[in-house]
Image (tube, coloured by chain):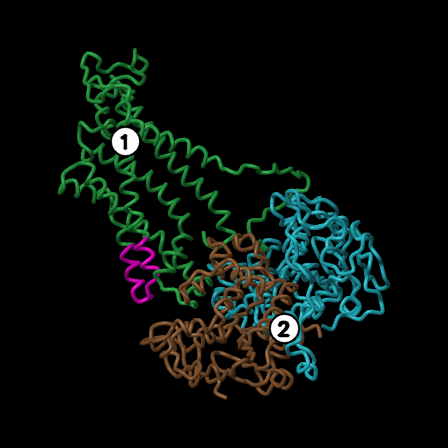
Chain colours: A brown, B green, C cyan
Amino acid sequence: MRPLVEARGLHFRYGKQRSAEAPWTLTDLSLQIRSDSTLGIVGESGSGKSTLIRVLAGLLNHQQGDVEFDGRDIRDWLTSSSTDLRRRNQIVFQSPRRSLDPRMSIGRSLSQPVRALDHRKPNSDELAGWLDRVGLGSELLKRFPHQLSGGQLQRVGIARALSVNPDVLYADEPVSALDVSVQAQVLNLLMDVRVQLGLTLVMVSHDLGVVSRLCEDVVVLRHGVIVEHGRAADVLAAPQHPYTAALVQAARTVSLK
Amino acid sequence: MPPAEGAFRTQSAQSKRRRRNRATKYPLSLVLGAVLVSSFLLVALVSFFWTPYDPAKISVPDRLLPPGSDGYLFGTDKLGRDVVTQLMLGARNSLYVSVLSTTVAITIGALFGLFVAGLRPFWQGPLTRMVDVGLALPGILVALVLATKLGPGNESAILAIIIWFIPVAARVTIGPAKQILALDYVEAAFSYGRTRRFVMLNHVLPNIAPLLIVLSSVMFAAAILIEASLAFLGVGVQPPTPSWGRFLSEAQPLLEAAPYLMYFPGMAIVLTVLGFNLLGDGLRTILDPQQARTGII
Amino acid sequence: MLEIRDLSVTIGPHQIVRIDALDIAMGERLGLVGESGSGKTMTAMSIIRLLPDEAEVSGSITFDGRSLLDCSDSEMSKVRGKDIAIVFQDPARALNPMMRIGRQIAEGIRLHMKMSKEKLQAKVLSLLAQVQLPDPESVLRRYPHQLSGGQQQRVLIAIAIACDPKLLIADEPTTALDVTVQEEILRLLVSLSEQRRMSLLFVSHDLGVVRFVCDRIAVAYGGNIVEVGPTDEIVDHPQHRYTSALLGANPGIPASEHIEQFVGQRLEVIPGSVPAQGSFPVGCRFRNRCDAATEQCMSEPAVTELAGGHRFHCWNPLGRSVDAATG
């Protein structure tokens, strides 16, 4: 089966294209993401993991290599059918407070993707339904972000992303900014919606424990290069690359199990 | 020296002061500023409908009467005109000049600032520097040059203030706008297909609005001061249209005989400018804590 | 060495911290674990009296026989940095970006000790070596932004231990660091504590980290210490349900052979979230999230003391036979 998302020889860097000194953030990166799978992208700061998902989702333009979504080059998608690309790829961000416009009510924020991509205003039943899907009550629609807790805001962010029924949900450290007890709730939520909606979930995380729980496959990034990839159970149980081994060992040191 | 997080201070156990519960919702500066500014606005607006005396009426026998004289609360000027009336009309002129120039300057400046904030670094750098150059322009000088070319009067004053303030508004906008553009909800907006223009107007602008409100109150104050200064120098609005600044300059030669002619317009200017500054300060205080919870300012 | 009794910190109408008893012995590493609203940072700050003006503190904090809450401001500033030192979470914010590393460390020392220039230099170099920074001579001359996060944190630790404090308070010192760097810093803290017989109060939201570093763990919720005891006891036989829930909520990497079976398995969840200040229920503050809450829980639970210094506040504890949640 053809992978849903594929990258071949991907190179990306920030900054002016002509400047030769700007270092590559991502170098010669190739990966495949199967439809309906869960992929964890693991790496430390500076690994390029956040950049990678933005390139795959079509938010950043890569300089070299190919990125394909559903068999078509992403540049092609962006020029001729960017709306569809956007509809099928959504992102959940790390910081719950920064991912919602503080001056917009929850209901209004929630309705943005549908307004932008489908050019229609969702009615209140739909909005309530989306909130319900993430375990929140419709009374939150009239409230503003500063009145909600971090966990609630993160759920709203997820609800917003799911409102357009994407194929792929990219999650950039979705629980790092949350309290431990709330983390579990949101992780469970991600697991549930993934199954219910048949999503492909691509999650960036520095926390191997979280990755081991949610993801079937894993990719380990270091300085913009994939050093190891494979089934999460295999990679984490028996890492081949010394860097992966170091990560796993460090994670085990502070793991409770 | 252990680094201390945030604004903590040491707690003296021996003097456990009981902190009064700060139930004040509105800071003093805001209240005071609002009172002063609304007085100013009231006076200026009322002057359109009513003044104690006909402003054009000259009564030479009544010239230079001191304040408190029969029927003349603040006295009369060298042509016998009632000072109160003249002050009210001066307020009107100040209002006209400052509202017009500030509104235009902030609108153009903020929009330009938004535009620059959204540019790629390649263009953003030079344009920001350009704005900085604009900031460095000596405003009064520009005003004087304009007055020479276009003739003295409100028009050249307004134009000068606009030219002077556009870079200020732009510069003040660029920083916060860039910060907001780096936030996740902006990235989210792009991820569901919003255009740059939509983001600028619907996400960035509302979130820097408090900043602009505060800026405009401070700009009003400055504009009033500039109008008065230009009138004082003789290049502002010409007689017979009243202006506080011109009253001041006309009062100079009469300082010994009638010092009150300088006090009243001077106080009017001081109180009005102070009022706007306090208002801006107060607005920033009440708008700040809300914003602090939610992101930017 | 450090004894906290009946500590109460109130800000406005809210009681942020209420601890009846908490001790740290000499050379002991105590972990203070809690989420937001647990009062853990406030508790740490009240020890060195770095609280906001509006905070009202009562109770007693005795350090080496001295009552810290009765000290004057100037006496307290002699204690800070010398007898009790503190390391914060974000090293980049704690270091002066305009000052070279060597000078920042030296300043900390000079505040409390008089020393000749040569001795000072030697001491700074020795400190940098003790925190395992390679090439101390070169680090001396660098500015903070030229160091990595882990290196910056080592520098902060160097500043903290410069005057041989008896107690080091570390507030989330590795939260902002990568996991491999975190391990190094944690090991460093443990070894420094052991070598110098320096007590460590390690404040964190991460139970796994605390378990690695500390001999004893205190679990905080809503400003109270709900349970405290030796690390192994707490992790293997938690009595308070919040402790057990925290243990279960933290996924951690399972043992290699178990990873497969845990993929896709839901995590144990503590229902609801930490209430805002002022919204805590009367009595046991955890009771509206606890599945074993009874009527009795509407009054504050008395303390129960088990062998080995394991104490907890709960009317319906889990009991000895129950093992820690394996999630």
Out of C175 and A183, give the one closest to the viewer: A183
Q: On the picture, is C276 further left or further right than C20?
A: left
Q: Quadrant of residue C107?
A: bottom right
Residue B143 highlighted magenta (yes or no): no
User: Is residue C300 among the parts visible in the rendering?
Assistant: yes
Rendering quarter of residue C55: top right
Do circles 1 and 2 both sit on a common chain?
A: no
Judging depth in this view, the residue of C188 and C237 nearest the camera is C237
Circle 1 residue: B92
Circle 2 crowding by C-alpha within 10 Å: few under 14, some 14–19, many from 20: many
The label on residue B26 is none
Q: Secondary structure at mark 1?
A: helix
Residue C87 horizontal/vertical position (percent): 61, 60
| Mark 1: amino acid | Arg
Main SS of the magenta part reads helix
Quarter holding residue B89? top left
Which amino acid type is shown beneath numbered disc 2? Glu
- Position of residue C145 in the picture relative to residue C195 (left or right): left
Label 1 and label 2: CA atoms lie apart by 70 Å
